[in-house]
C-alpha cells in the first residue's frame, strides 16, 4: 500500500508526542490521537451485553415468533395484490434463487450410466427489493433476492431496513439478479425450487473454499524445482519472475498469496431432478464452495443451452397457484428407484 | 426317592417344615424368537458437518430401491452371487460369485468388493449396492470372519480365495446367530502389497509364519494410546435405533 510510509511516520510522531495516547484510545475506542490512523470502531459491545438473561430469552422468542408470522403471511403471493404477470417471450430474463449446497450423491440414467450430482436446497428464499431500470442504468431492472433466515442481532440497521420494508425475516445472503421488465416480482414473494425444471441448464455461483496464504505451486500449479541434485534451499519457489530486457515485473504476475474464498461460477449444469416437498434441486457435476454454503443459482446464459427455456414458470413458480406438482420431478433420462432394474435388449 | 424330611424327623422330635422342591424352568427354544436387528452399514451417516436432511433424502431413495430389489443381509466374509445387466454379453446378463472382502461408502454410493479366483487368475469386482443394473444379489453362504476387511486375501494362498461358481446356497435361518469363521489364512512369501503384520491393520485372521524379530519390529509401531482417544469415539447406537425404526416403518408400507 503506497501510504504505509506516511502512516508509519505519522504514527511514530504521535507515539513520541503524546504520552498515554494509545492507552486513552483503547479505553475510549474512538477518541485520542489515533482517530486518523486507526479505522473507527462504531461500537465495542454486542447486542445483549447490557441485557439481563430474561430479556435476551424474551427477545429471541419474540423475534422467532415474528418471523414465523411473517413467513406465514407471505405464503399466498397470488392473493396479495400481485404485480401483473406477463407471458414468456424469447429474450426475457427471469430471477434466480439462493440455495444451500447440501452435498453430493450418485444418480443413474435409464441407460445405466452413473453421474455425480450436487443437492441444492432452497430454504426461505424471498424477493427483497425491486429497482426499476430507470433507477439502475436505463437498461435492466434489478431484483434483490435473499437466502436462508438468520438472526437480526448481528446485522447493521441499514441491512435490516431492506428486510423490514419487504416484511420478511433477515437473510444470510442477498444477491442481485438482472431481470427483464416482464419478469419483475413483488418484494416479499417466496421463491421455490420448482422455479427450475428438470432438463434445463443452470449457472451456479459460490465462494470457493478458502485455502489461506498459499505458495506458487499450489496456487498457480508451478512445477517448482527438483528435490535433489544440488538444489540449495529451492524446491517450491517460483524461480525467475521477469527478464532483464523488460526490467520490471508485469502487473498480475503469478505469485504466492491468499487462495480461495472468491466467487466462481460453474456454467451449463444440467438440472436432473427437483424435489418439491423439501425444495431440493439436483444439479449435475460439482459446484464451488463447502457443504452448507450459500449459492446463487440462475438460468444458464450459454447460447447452446437456450433451447430448454420454451415454457419456464414465468416470472416464477407460485405455490398457491393452480398447478399441483408431484413430489418429485425427474428428467426423461433419469432412472427412478421405483422402477424395476435396468435391462438391455 | 426318599425325601430328607423323614430323616429329619428321626433326628429331632419336632415336625420339620415341608420344603417343596424347586420348580423346573422350561425354556421352549422353538418358540422363543430373538429377532436379529441388522441395519446395513451404509444407512449410518458418517461423522461430519453435513446436514442430516441430505442423508434422509438419500435414505428415501435407498428404501425405494430396496422395495424393488431384495438386498439381503451380508457381512465381510460371506459368499455372494451377483447378476448384473451387461449390454455386451450374449444373454445381456453377467453373473459373478465371490467372497465379500470389503464394504465401503455411505448412502447411495455404498459399494462392496467380491473376490474370486477364476482359472488361476484372481478377480475382484466392486459393485455399487444401489446401481440399477444389478438384477439379483444372493447370499450363498452367510458368515463373518475375524476381520472387517479381507484385502489380505490378495497376498494369501489362492486356495483361500477360490470358490465354486456353481456352489449351492447354504441355508440359514433368520434367527440364528451368524457363524464367525475362525479361519487363519496362510500367506504367500513376502513381499506383500501391504505390511499386514503391522498393528495398524489389526488383522486377526492371518496365520503369521514370520520370524519373531519381524513381528517384534512390527509391534514397535503400535499406538496403544489410540483406544483411549476420546475424539475418535463415534457412538452410533442411538442414531442406529432411530434409523432402524424409520427404515423398518417405510419398508413395511
Image: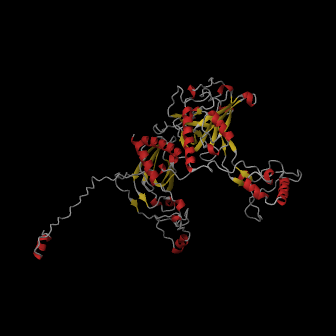
Q: Is residue A321 left or right of residue A159?
A: left
Which quadrant of the figure has residue B9? bottom left
Front-most of residues A226 and A34: A34
Q: Is residue B21 above or below residue B136?
A: below
Q: In this view, does A83 lie above or below A236?
A: above
Task: Give x and y (percent) for residue B131.
Answer: 50, 44
Figure coloring: secondary structure
Q: Residue at x 68, y 26 (%)?
A: A181
Q: Residue at x 50, y 34 (%)?
A: A327
Can residue B133 be seen from the camera position used here? no
Task: Give x and y (percent) for residue A288.
Answer: 65, 45
Can residue B54 be seen from the camera position used here? yes
Front-most of residues B42 and A226: B42
Q: In this view, does B52 lie above or below A165?
A: below
Residue with the most extreme bottom position: B11
Which quadrant of the figure has residue A93? top right
Which quadrant of the figure has residue A115? top right
Front-most of residues B117 and A290: A290
Task: Give x and y (percent) for residue B65.
Answer: 46, 41
Front-most of residues A303 and A60: A60
In the rendered picture of this protein, how many numbered marks are placed on residues? 0
Q: Is residue A131 left or right of residue B145?
A: right
Task: Give x and y (percent) for residue B199.
Answer: 52, 66
Amino acid at each position: 500500500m503506497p501510504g504505509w510510509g506516511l502512516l508509519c511516520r505519522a504514527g511514530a510522531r504521535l507515539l513520541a508526542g503524546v504520552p498515554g495516547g494509545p492507552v486513552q484510545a483503547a479505553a475510549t475506542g474512538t477518541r485520542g490521537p489515533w482517530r486518523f490512523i486507526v479505522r473507527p470502531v462504531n461500537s465495542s459491545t454486542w447486542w445483549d451485553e447490557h441485557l439481563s438473561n430474561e430479556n435476551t430469552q424474551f427477545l429471541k422468542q419474540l423475534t422467532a415468533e415474528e418471523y414465523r408470522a411473517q413467513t406465514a403471511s407471505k405464503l399466498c403471493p397470488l392473493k396479495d395484490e400481485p404485480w401483473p404477470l406477463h407471458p414468456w417471450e424469447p429474450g426475457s430474463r427471469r430471477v434466480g434463487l439462493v440455495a444451500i449446497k447440501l452435498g453430493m450423491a450418485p444418480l443413474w440414467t435409464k441407460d445405466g450410466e452413473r453421474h455425480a450430482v450436487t443437492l441444492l436446497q432452497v430454504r426461505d428464499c424471498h424477493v427483497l427489493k425491486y429497482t426499476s431500470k430507470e433507477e439502475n442504468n436505463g437498461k435492466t431492472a434489478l431484483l434483490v433476492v435473499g437466502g436462508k433466515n438468520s438472526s437480526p442481532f448481528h446485522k447493521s440497521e441499514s441491512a435490516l431496513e431492506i428486510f423490514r420494508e419487504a416484511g420478511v425475516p433477515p437473510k444470510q445472503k442477498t444477491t442481485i439478479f438482472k431481470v427483464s421488465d416482464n419478469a419483475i416480482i413483488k418484494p416479499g414473494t417466496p421463491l421455490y425450487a420448482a422455479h427450475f425444471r428438470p432438463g434445463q441448464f443452470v449457472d451456479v455461483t459460490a465462494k470457493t473454499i478458502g485455502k489461506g496464504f498459499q505458495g506458487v505451486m499450489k496456487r498457480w500449479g508451478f512445477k517448482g524445482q527438483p528435490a535433489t541434485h544440488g538444489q540449495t534451499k529451492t524446491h517450491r519457489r517460483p524461480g525467475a519472475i521477469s527478464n532483464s530486457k523488460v526490467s520490471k515485473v508485469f502487473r498480475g504476475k503469478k505469485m504466492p498469496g491468499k487462495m480461495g474464498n472468491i466467487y466462481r461460477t460453474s456454467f451449463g449444469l444440467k438440472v436432473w431432478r427437483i424435489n418439491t416437498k423439501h425444495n431440493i434441486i439436483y444439479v449435475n457435476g460439482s459446484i464451488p464452495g463447502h457443504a452448507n454454503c450459500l449459492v446463487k443459482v440462475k438460468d444458464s446464459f450459454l447460447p447452446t443451452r437456450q433451447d430448454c427455456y420454451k415454457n419456464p414458470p414465468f416470472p416464477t413458480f407460485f405455490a398457491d397457484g393452480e398447478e399441483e406438482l408431484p413430489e418429485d420431478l425427474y428428467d426423461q433420462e433419469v432412472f427412478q428407484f421405483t422402477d424395476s432394474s435396468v435391462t438391455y435388449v | 426317592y426318599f425325601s430328607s424330611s423323614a430323616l429329619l424327623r428321626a433326628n429331632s422330635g419336632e415336625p420339620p417344615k415341608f420344603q417343596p422342591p424347586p420348580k423346573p424352568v422350561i425354556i421352549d427354544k422353538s418358540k422363543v424368537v430373538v429377532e436379529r436387528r441388522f441395519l446395513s452399514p451404509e444407512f449410518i451417516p458418517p461423522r461430519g458437518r453435513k446436514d442430516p436432511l441430505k442423508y434422509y433424502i438419500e435414505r428415501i431413495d435407498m428404501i425405494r430401491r430396496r422395495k424393488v430389489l431384495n438386498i439381503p443381509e451380508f457381512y465381510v466374509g460371506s459368499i455372494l452371487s451377483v447378476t448384473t445387466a451387461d449390454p455386451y454379453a450374449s444373454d445381456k446378463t453377467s453373473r459373478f460369485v465371490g467372497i465379500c472382502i470389503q464394504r465401503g461408502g455411505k448412502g447411495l454410493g455404498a459399494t462392496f468388493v467380491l473376490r474370486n479366483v477364476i482359472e488361476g487368475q484372481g478377480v475382484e469386482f466392486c459393485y455399487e449396492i444401489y446401481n440399477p443394473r444389478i438384477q439379483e444379489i444372493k447370499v450363498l453362504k452367510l458368515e463373518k470372519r475375524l476381520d472387517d476387511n479381507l484385502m489380505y486375501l490378495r497376498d494369501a494362498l489362492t486356495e483361500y480365495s477360490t470358490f465354486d461358481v456353481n456352489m449351492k446356497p447354504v441355508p440359514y435361518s433368520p434367527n440364528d446367530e451368524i457363524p464367525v469363521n475362525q479361519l487363519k489364512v496362510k500367506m504367500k512369501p513376502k513381499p506383500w502389497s501391504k505390511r499386514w503384520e503391522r498393528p495398524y491393520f489389526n488383522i486377526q485372521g492371518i496365520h503369521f509364519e514370520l520370524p519373531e524379530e519381524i513381528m517384534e519390529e512390527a509391534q514397535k509401531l503400535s499406538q496403544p494410546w489410540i483406544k483411549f482417544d476420546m475424539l475418535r469415539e463415534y457412538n452410533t447406537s442411538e442414531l442406529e435405533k432411530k434409523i432402524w425404526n424409520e427404515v423398518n416403518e417405510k419398508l413395511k408400507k
